[in-house]
Image (cartoon, helix red, strand yellow):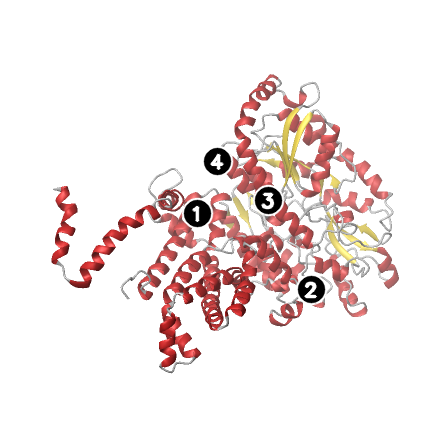
Amino acid sequence: MSSSAVTSPYAQAPRKRGLRAVVERTRGLGSGRGLPFVLPYLPFLILFGIAPMIYALKLAVTKDNGDWAGLHNFTRTVDDYRFGPAFKHIFLYTGVWLGALVIFVVTLALLLHGRANRVSSTFRFVFYIPGALAGAASVLVWLFMLDPSVSPGSFLVHNVLGAGLFVESIAPGHLPFIFAMIAFWTGAGGWIVVMYGALNTIPQDLEEAARIDGAGPIGIALRLKLPLIRKWIAYMVILSFATGTQLFVEPQLVNQASLGLVPDTWSANQLAYQEAFRYADFNAAAAIAVDLLAIGLFAAVLIVSRTGLFRTED
Amino acid sequence: MRVFERSAPGWSRWRRMRWTILTSLAVTGIAVGLAACGGSSGSGSTSSQAATSSTASGAKAAGPASGSLTVWVDSVRLPAAKAYQKAHPDVHLKIVTFDGDANGATTLQTKIQLWNRSGKGWPDVIFSEQVNDPVWMAKKPFEFAQPIKGLVPESALRQWPAPSTAQCTIDGTQYCVQDNLAQVVLWVNKKLMDRFGYTVPTTWQEWAALGQKVATEHPGYIVGNSGDSFSHWIYLWSGQCPLQQLKGDKVTINATDPHCTRMASLMDPLIKNGTVPPLSVFTPDFAKKYGGAKDKVLLMPGPAWFATALFHDTLHLPAGQITAASPLKWENESPVVTGQVGGGPWIVSKHSKNLKAAGDFVTWETTVFNDKRPGYPAYAPLADSWLATLAKDPFFASDPTAALKGAAPLIWQGWNLVTYPDQPVWSNTVVTKLVAGTALSALLQPLGDGLANAAQAAGYQVARE
């Protein structure tokens, strides 16, 4: 019986006609062939991705003695006086950062793609350099950049941020924008390279056809290239959204550098950390982690469904 | 606060940042190392455990301390820990430096949580810059601190001033000894005061009046500062503002009490006219504007450890200018009380496998070590010799010791120690707004609200009046 169940799709296949049948057959084969490629990653995904997630879900709905707590951990963390500000901060930050990322990365990539190869590779390298300073190191560099007394761009700090002192640079109202700027310059270069790669997959003859039809460089960029790299942009937004809402290192370092002027629960992830390790409340921490997971998943589903990221038959 | 009694000279933010990073790297590295060595130290400790249990009376046991000992100290206490090692070659000392929980950081809470969870890795002795740290260390869920009785000789324990012992006593048991006393006095630039023809104020009112005068007659000079994470301990603690009054598990927070508002309204004009700027004394901006050759600190209410840690080592003020005066009083109110900024405690771990050496270490650090000690020793006999050295120090314009000694017993006892750090609340809700130009009087209510939130999150019942 089981063998007939396995063979039945193939048995029916010849009866299907046309493209559909072909697509279905290649897809069936594809998933089988794809398995060896996915396999090495699977244990890690389970160990470091899925298992902790299940553990967090379990912690989030239980008390510290293991009893069922229902949604209590969620309601009490939402009621916490730091919850609202922390989520407000990360949403504002993520919004500013994602907006900047999409607009500037796509624009710069499109501009570079229109240039001669040598110019474009030089600029790609230049844009990539700030990203070579990973996480914490880039924050440190930025702390000096933002200190009017030592910054090489002190006139900018003074005129744009209106700050004559370091404490004025990192005023609470500036922080989401400052963190967004730090994150933009560390991540943008890498994404520009990715987008450039995506643009290179566009067949040359498509571009030529558009040119023959009378499209100028702007028209080609906006009406041909942009729609074709839409999925890459969606991919960037999904990954960046998750990274953005999980902001931790930047505010944590600024908290220390500012001698405590910036709260140690500035972002939601920091709040979860504090709940876990300062108050020994792993259940509350797990609840906040699950909130972040839900937000990330919701955004991902929304973006995937709106952009057709996983659609293969376009 | 960033670091109490800073002893290293010339700290700029860069060095501090670098320090923070290096420390956190070191701490992480060592934490990993400890975890990795957990097995070996565990097996190695069986013998030392046997040795300890055979000398169950701890410090009373005869013979010098030996064995291995892990201590966690802040950067300021590093020379003191190294000095112990030099004096005690039989003890295998492992020193770990960390941020000292400066500015109300909660490094130790997170570390102890992790050690408690993994069941190993605890250091034997910790120095914290936070005078309130032993409060939570003695309680659930941390339960880290070992009662100090039996570790430090009884005869020595009696030499700590009663208020100091009281700060280390939690639910009737003493869990720590204070390293230093941190009473607030009025620091005076005698040379400048003489040149300007001013007399040293004795009351907060005179101080405020002088601040107004300085703003018009000598703009740029300052009579205090309000931008440190501990500024409320200088002004509001001295002013007897009831922000932390404890009765059992109930904390009374009344930030709009007249004792708070009267100090705030005295300070507001001075913050506005620039004579009490909302800047931290440990920022490069402060040193640049008021320190070194600029020499613009006229008066500064501040703790005993400002003596060398701030004026000499951080601001590099010229010698022969600074001295101390008695704490400012409120008009003719008596008794005169003052604030406290720090006075870090030494805490021994109850998990220590070498309590004898741990007790010996703490005893030595607090009752013997006196070489370039950064703060006013809490242990009374040591304080006398420390003051004698200070009296002869040519850095001071005149002998500051009388004022320091006189202020030691005046710390207001109405400010109780709680499990949560209050510094971040002051920094986040008040200092950032003072920088933006809001008046302190308008920030007292938010300060009270912030403290109430922190207290509730830490499990206290809160009474607002």
Label 4 environment density (alpha carbons within 10 Å; few <14, some 14–19, many ≥20): few
Q: Are marks 4 and 1 on the same chain?
A: no
Secondary element type, mark 4: helix
Q: Which chain letter matches label 3? A: B
Q: What is the quadrant of the C terminus of chain B in the image?
A: bottom right
The residue identified by callout 1 is A285
The CA span between labels 3 and 2 is 38 Å
Front of the two marks 4 and 3: 3
Q: Is residue B423 left or right of residue A207?
A: right
Residue at left offset 38%, top offset 37%: A65
Looking at the image, is mark 4 or mark 3 earlier in the sequence? 3
Q: Which mark is residue B25?
A: 3
Label 1 environment density (alpha carbons within 10 Å; few <14, some 14–19, many ≥20): many
Q: Which chain letter matches label 4? A: B
Q: Which mark is residue B271?
A: 2
Q: Which chain letter matches label 1? A: A
